[in-house]
Structures are given as C-alpha cells and as structure tokens.
Amino acid sequence: MKKLIFAVIALSISLFGFDYHLKPKEIAKGVYMFTGVNEPVKSSNGGAIANSYWVKTPKHWVVVDSGPTYEYAKQAHKAIKKIANLPIKLVFNTHFHDDHWMANSYYKELKVPIYATKTQTNEYKPGGSSRVLKLLKKEDLANTKIVTVDNVVDKNFTIDVDGTKFSVIKLDNPAHAPEDFMVYLKERGVLFTGDLLMSERLTSIRHGSIEGSLAAIKLIEQINPKVYANGHGKFTDKTALKETKAYLEQLKSTALAAIKKEQELDDYVKSANFDAFKKYKLFDVAHKENLFAAFKEYEFFEE
C-alpha cells in the first residue's frame, strides 16, 4: 500500500512539475513581489532564486524579471490573477543571468513583448542552452526554452502604461553584468534594481565590474527610492544597498592595498579578511571568485 502511495505521489510530481508555492507580497501600492530563495540554482528549488515583480496599472500588469521556468511563470500568473485578472502588457529582463528570465517562454505564448539587454540576445539564442536548462529536472522544465527578445534596451526611455510611467535607466558601463538596466516608478517610489543590489547574500561580479557596480550604487543613492525592489533577498528597505555597498567597497580597498604592497594574487586570496561577510548566504560559493575578479580589475587601475 505504501509503495502504491509513493508511486502516485511520484506520478503527480512528474505530471505537474515543480510546485513553487508562490505567494505575492505587496511592497508598494499595486507592486507585488515573489521572493526567491538565497541559494544557487538547483533542482530542489526549481531555479527560483531571484525575485520577480508584478506591477498593477489600471488595465494591465507589467512584469519585472519573469523567473526561472515556464511553470514558475504560469503559477505566478495564476496567483496574481486572484488580485486582478488583467492582461499582461510587457515583461522587463533587467540583465542576462538566466535565473531572472527563462520564464519568458510562458509570456511568449501569450504574445507579451519582452524587453531585455543586447547581451542577453547575443549570449542566448533560441534552441540553445543555459544554466537553468542544465541544472533542473526535465519534468520541471516542460515548455521552458530560450525565446527571442522583442525589444533591446540600449538607452534610457519611459513607457506609459495606462498613465503609469515606467522609466528605464540603462547603465553606461558593466556593473553586475556586462549590461544592466533598472526600472523606476517615480510616482510610487519604487526602484527595480535587478542584481545591482542583493540582501542576505553575496553578489557575484564574475561578469561585471566593481567600479561599475559602485557607480550604479551611487546613482541609486541619488535616486533615493522609498522601496528597493532588489534582485535577491527579502528586504525592500535600504538593507540591500548597505550590504552590497559595504562588500564591494571592501573588495576594492583590500585589492588595492594588496597590489600596492606587491602581494601575489594567491596570497591576497588567502589573507584578505572578510570575516564580517561570512554570515551571508553564498559566501562559500561566490567570495573566492570575487577576490580573483577584484584583483584582476584593480591590478592596473587608475582613478
């Protein structure tokens, strides 16, 4: 009997895919957040490590960072319909890391326009592969695939959706990624930062730049939003700003000090003191690689 029950459960999972247990949290008027887990992409979390956001306008929804899989987007849409059953106007992908946008395939079926960076369109072609496609279970990836982007974000612009203005802020230089953009809802005081900011976990600069990231943080500080809709982590106050800035500044200062002392790279990696950041998630995963990247960036750096 027990074997039969387990077989039924296993069959149900294979038929219906990963259950994300998505519950939208309102972080500002008409702005809802689905919070990711602070872990690497793996089958046990269905790839749902990044935050995804929905913005309600009078007649539509707008999505910022669609999520990791088709099934994730389908479940998010089902959950958000309980708040308001409105059509989706467009989807923004803030940067090219696939945990933020492999769910585009769901929205493509609904004929929703997708806005993304040129880096994303260059790096990921329809029919190709990605980290999410390699790491998740086949049954959890049903209908998940790389789809074409409809609009390439290569400059600042504003889109008006039913009187709600979405200001797209394209960064001039690499920051978290080779290309990043933010979305600002000035009238609601919400800034969608993508992975330029994270809380409770370390960032990764393997594809970006510490200097570019610090410049982005300076811009964010100038904007000074009421609500920080960050790429990862549950906090929407200044927590992610403070945590990300402190870590990046420590990377810069320690790398410059090591280079000034003519320290070798391996010695720097072994001796740099980052004890204050060991409490953050993904320290063991991202930190060593960030040290290498910091040393390389500042080895021939001139202010």
Image (cartoon, grey):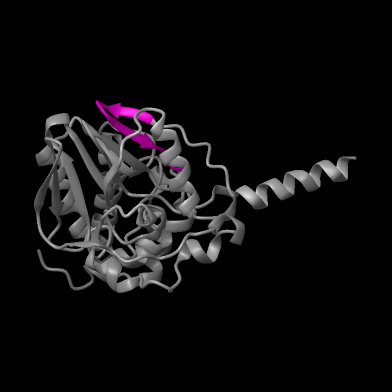
Residue 178: % across, % down: 24, 65
Residue drawn at (65%, 51%) of the image = 15
Residue at 44% x, 34% y is 79
**Seen in the image, is 73 located left or right of residue 250?**
right
Query: Quick check: 34 left or right of 160?
Result: right
Quadrant of image for the N terminus: top right
Q: Position of residue 75 (x, y in %)?
A: 48, 42
Along the horizontal axis of the image, is 174 left or right of 35?
left
Q: Nearer the viewer, residue 183 or 1?
A: 1
Say how many tags the image has. Answer: 0
Q: Quadrant of residue 254?
A: bottom left
Left or right placement of residue 86 versus residue 79 in this view: left
Say which of 194 and 278 sits in front: 194
Q: Quadrant of residue 229?
A: top left
Residue interval drawn in magenta:
25-38
Q: Is residue 264 above or below residue 248?
A: below
Query: Does residue 226 appear in this view?
Result: yes
On whether residue 194 falls in the magenta region, the answer is: no
Q: Is residue 29 magenta?
A: yes
Depth check, front residue: 143 or 115? 143
Q: Residue furthest right?
A: 1
Which residue is nearer to you in this view: 107 or 284? 107
The quadrant of the image that shows the C terminus is bottom left
The x, y position of residue 148, in whole percent, is 32, 66
- Rendered position, 259 above or below 159: below
Report x, y in % for residue 291.
35, 62
Residue visible at 23% across and 34% down in the picture:
59
- The reply to whether residue 242 is in sight is no
